[in-house]
Every structure is written in structure tokens, then in C-alpha cells.
Image (cartoon, rainbow, N blue to C red):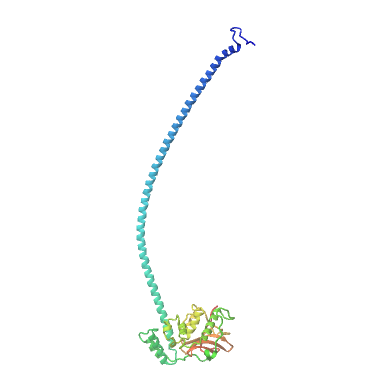
Amino acid sequence: MREQTGSDSGAPLWRQSFLTALPIVLTLMGGFAVNWYQGQEQHSRQLAQEAAQAKKVGKDRMEAEKARRAEAARLFKMQERELAAQRSAQDRQLGEAARLASLATTEERERLTRQHAIDHSRQIREFQEAAERQRRQNEADLILEVIKVGDLNVARGNIDFLLAAGLVRDPGGRIADAARKTPPVLPTPSGSLVAARDFSEAGPLAVVDPERPVAGISRSAVRLLACAQGEFNRDIEERRSADRLAAYFEGLGFGDGRKTDLSTLPWNAAFVSYCVRIAGLSKRILPSARGMALLESAQRSGLAVDATAPGFQFRPGDIYVLLRTSNPMASHSGIVISVTEKAIEGVEGNLNNGVLLVTRNVPLQQLRGVIRAPD
């Protein structure tokens, strides 16, 4: 088959069309190429401008950061200098305050030392005065007891013993002189006494439990009762019971009873005082070597009862105080153990040189007072 040819040149038609379109295509391609190149060039310039701008911004930021850091360092150094100045000022203030405090502390310490010395001296003086008052009272109580005997020679011997033992001071000899002038008195009250038995005669007493209640009497009275019963059961005799006499005189201001022959002293009230201490009543009834002092202390504490009141009856655990003579200070005391309609049984110390179980008719003759232990 033969190719179609053009009418003018005789060339094939497709070649003519190609040749006709080729310039146009090349022109378009050239335009595209130019436009692409121009776009690329513009993009490159834009990128370069952006890079330059970013570099400038980064440089500005670096400069700003550098300036900020420099300013911060400057401010930090300034603060350090200010803080150093403040610390220095504070150190100076603290040093001055410490110096002043040291001076004040020294002065205060000296003042407190002086005040302590003054207080200590006052306490010593008050203690010495109280001790002296107690010593004089004990001496008076003891002297009243030792002169309550029926034989003036015995009274003088008792006084001589007290002076020799250092239990009583009598620089002027007035005590011994008073003892020689004191009229004789009865050794014990006897008007209401029916019987007096020692341990060998009466046998042991049943001792109540001091911690268990007994109907009709207080707990303190139970402890007094138990103490009296227990001491009777010890079969006390003054010549062979030095330890018990020392216990009775303990706290009464007569020195070390274990080194002193207390059997030469009247110890009736000391025996009752011992049971008062054992019963826990020594704050209400002040222990004493003198029976009337026990009664007077009980009266001040409201523990003395009126034995003359209608309907009065003794109770176990009661303490009775009797007169031994017309001398109102000469007394003898005991602790009630049991009660009947017409008599009481009691335990009394320093009776026939021992602790005896006695029976006395009621009403008691020469009764000076009754002490009743509280609940």
C-alpha cells in the first residue's frame, strides 16, 4: 500500500504535520523550561532569603540569650554581694547579741546563785528552828514521862540517864532541879483495873486481818486492833525486847534506840504511837512519847470522842488515855481489844515492864479522853 502524499511537496502527510508541529512543540517546551528555570531560581532566592533571615533571627536570639545570661550573671553577683553584706551584718549583730547575752547570763547566773544561797540559808535556818522546836517538845514530853514515877530517886535516876545519854540538854541544871521538886505520883492508874495478864498467863490472841473489814469499826481501827494483838503475842518484856522498844521509839527523836537502853524510859505512849504509825494515822495523830500529846493531837484532828456523852460505848480499836495522878500531864494509854457491858479488855505497854492484856471496869476511872480512828 502506498503512503498518502501531500499535494504540494509530495512528502508524506504525517511528516508534514510533524514538521509543522515541531516548532510549536519546541517553543512550548522552551517556554516551560524557561518558566521552570525561573521558578527554580526564584525558589532558590527565596530559600536563600529565608536562610539568611533564619540565620539573622538565630544570631539575634543568640545575642539576646548572651545578653540575658550576662545580665543574669550580673544580677547574681550583685545578689551574692548583697547577701554577703547581709550575712556580715547579721554576724555582727549575732556577735553583739551573744556578747550581751553572755553578760546578761553571767549577771543572771550570779543573781540566781545569790538567790539560791539566800533560799538555802533560809531553808536551813527554818529546818534548824523546826528541829529545835521539835527537840524541845520531845525533851518536854520525855521529861514529863520520866518524872511520873512514885520514887523521887528513880525520877532523878531517869533524869541523870537522859542527861548522860545526851537525849536532854540541861546546861543550867533546871530540869534536874524540877525533877527533885516534883511530887511522887502513882506508877499506873489502878482505880478501874480488874486484871492484868501477860502472854504466859493469857495465851496468844487471835489477830484480826488488818486488811479485812470488821463490822462496827473503821478500817484504821482494824489496823490498830491487829497491831495491838500482834504486839501482845510477841510476849514483850522490856529487858529482853530491846528491838521492839527501838521500834516503838522510832521517829520520836530519841536517837538510835538500838544503842540506847530504852527500857529505862517510860514507853507506854511510844507503844501506842507505834500502832498509830502502823495503822497509817500518823498524819492525823502525831506520834509522841506522851499520852496526853496523842490525845491533844487527836482533838485538833477531830478524832477525840466524848466518853461522857449519853449512850457512849467503847469500840475495839479505840485508844483510851487515863490520868495517873492529879498532874494533868501524867497519863497512861491503851488500845481496846474487846468490849462487854461492864468492862473492856485492852492492850497496854509499859505495864509491869511489858505489854499486858488488861481488864478494866467501865466507866473507866481517871479517863481523860478517847481517840477513835476514822474510816
Q: Position of residue 158 (x, y in %)?
A: 41, 88
Residue positioned 49% across, 83% down in the render: 272
110 shown above or below 264: above
Q: Is residue 120 visible?
A: yes
Residue nearer the viewer, 87 or 316: 87
Considering depth in this image, is 209 or 369 the residue closer to the camera? 209
Relative height, residue 23 to residue 140 (above, below): above
Judging depth in this view, the residue of 348 and 238 nearest the camera is 238
**Residue located at (36% from left, 65% from top):** 111
Where is residue 258? Give x, y as percent.
Answer: 43, 83
Residue 330: x percent and y percent?
Answer: 46, 87
| Number of on-image labels | 0
In screen coordinates, is 55 left or right of 27? left
Q: Which residue reaches farthest top?
A: 8
Q: Is 82 placed above or below 372 here?
A: above
Quarter of the image with the C terminus in it: bottom right
For image coordinates 37% across by 50% down, the residue present is 87
Say if 256 sits above or below 185 in the image: above
Q: Find the residue positioned furthest to the front.
A: 1
Q: Looking at the figure, which quarter contains the N terminus?
A: top right
Answer whether residue 291 is visible to the viewer in this image.
no
Return the x and y of residue 216 as percentages of the image width and height. Answer: 59, 81
Residue plotted at (50% across, 24% down): 40
